[in-house]
Image (cartoon, rainbow, N blue to C red):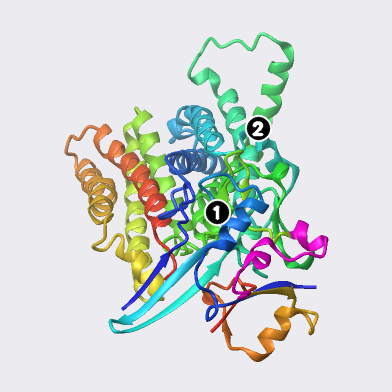
Amino acid sequence: MRYAMAIDTKKCVGCSDCVVACQTENNVPVGYCRDWVVEVTDGTYPQLEIEIRSERCNQCNNSPCVRCCPTGASHYADGGVVLVTHEKCIGCGACITSCPYDARYSHPEGYVDKCTFCIHRIKQGLEPACVAACPTKCMYFGDLDDPNSPVSEILKVRKYKTLIPEAGTDPQLYFLI
Amino acid sequence: MREEIIVSGRDNPLIDPHLHIWHWQIPLYLFLGGLAAGILFFAGLYTILGKEKSYPTAIRIAPHIVPIVLVIGLLALLLDLKHKLYFWRLYTTIRLESPMSWGAWVLMLVTPLSFIWSAIHIKDIFPRWNWKYQFLFTLEEFFTKYKLVIAWIMTIASVILGVYTGILFSAFNARPLWNTSILGPLFLASGLSAGAATIMLFSKNHAERGMLSRIDIGIIVVELFLIVHMFMGFLASTQVQINAAGLFLGGPYTASFWIFVVILGMIIPVILEILELRKYRIPVLIPAGLVLFGSLMLRFLIAFAGQESRWLY
């Protein structure tokens, strides 16, 4: 089992509903966010191209955050999802520093927090909150090992890219282009 | 032209607009850890070589400050933790892939060793020291008997400690300025140089000071060589590392790095030490103080600039 997410940059309108859905679902403290929207503008007016991406933790296969964690708090859970055990985390900041995507932050309660792919919802058979809330249905979630999952289906037919693959992290967030 | 901006308003504290999670605590600790490693290295090495007569300060006097230095460093590390009460979790596991885990365990070895070393030489500082309890006398006798073994462990552990202070940074591929394995030897050299400088400060023995002065000159030359190679490596590498090196080559950290670390912390002390060896009278406080200052600044600037360096993103 390998959970992954595909995000259609052609359909995303940058409304930030995914951000609010995540903050509500996961009780993210005020002033913090686990996901965010990036807008890339390319070219010179009037030849402009825009790409909009909803980003979050890439749930990497080769996660530097898991590697550098001195206590084993950061770990791979079922489906390759990278999680933090709060009671094991000492808040040293090594994982925050090690993430090329800056996807982690220090929770006001001391431990390090990040996107969990809403693993608690997946276990109930639901989609992650951001995917469920997306008004343009631009996000696809599922198991890459299952050829019939929404994410496998869309990756079969669309061109995609990952973010900073040269960092060697083998990210599992696919952006459809 | 290409512009990437976060439009959903991400402003995570300590992360945005650029990472600044590590403040003064980490670089201060790295300096103190390197300094402790340097002093213990010379104490251990000269004991192994059987040079107790010619290096009395290095073996018997200077190591007394190591426990103090390490305790201050450990306090700084503790202050850096955001989940302080869980610090003991470091010692419930050994994570070979994590430099911080290595560091925690090496400190667990080096700190008690430094206390033992200080205890078996306590009479050199306080000649009328009395342990009061019989078991403490027995312990002192036991450790004195195995002093050579302790010296061996101390020398090896201090090298690991010194290298680890650099590896801690270089293991982070996400921060291109740190992602060079030269930081390991560079921080080790800087720690050894700071250790030699501290021993010189305490030494009243002219011959010992002269020898340490020569060693220090050698180490600083190696450091300069490593710094040049570090920048050569960056400039011959990918765009992210070229940008990272730019922080020190024209960017916001240029003046502080080259003036404080290279000129004041390395070149001037070398000139002063050479002059002193040529029989000019130079107060030892000046070159030694400058070396310590340069070593501290190196840690601070690499720590802060490294957090500003990032992938093209």
Where is residue B76? Give x, y as percent: 50, 34
Q: Is residue A28 visible?
A: yes
Q: Is residue B160 above or below residue B145?
A: below
Residue under mark 1: which chain is it in? A
| Distance in Å between CA atoms under marks 2 and 1 | 25 Å
Dividing the image into 4 quarters, which one contains the C terminus of chain B?
A: bottom left
Residue under mark 2: which chain is it in? B
The residue most toward the left is B280
Label 1 secondary element: loop
**Label 2 environment density (alpha carbons within 10 Å; few <14, some 14–19, many ≥20):** few
Residue type at the position of mark 1: Cys
- Given residues A82 and A18, the one toward you in this image is A18
The residue most toward the right is A124
Dividing the image into 4 quarters, which one contains the N terminus of chain B?
A: bottom left
Where is residue B305? Give x, y as percent: 37, 54
- Residue receiving disc 2: B85
Name which residue lies at 42% across and 74% down.
Answer: A40
Name which residue lies at 72% across and 48% down.
Answer: A85
- Given residues A123 and B92, the one toward you in this image is A123
Label 2 secondary element: helix
Q: Quadrant of residue B109?
A: top right
Checking the image for residue B36, the label placed there is none
Residue type at the position of mark 2: Leu
The residue most toward the front is A135
Q: Nearer the viewer, mark 2 or mark 1?
A: 1
Checking the image for residue A33, the label placed there is 1
Where is residue B292? Give x, y as percent: 34, 40
Q: Is residue A131 magenta?
A: yes
Horizontal relation, residue B213 to residue B128: left or right: left
Magenta range: A119-138
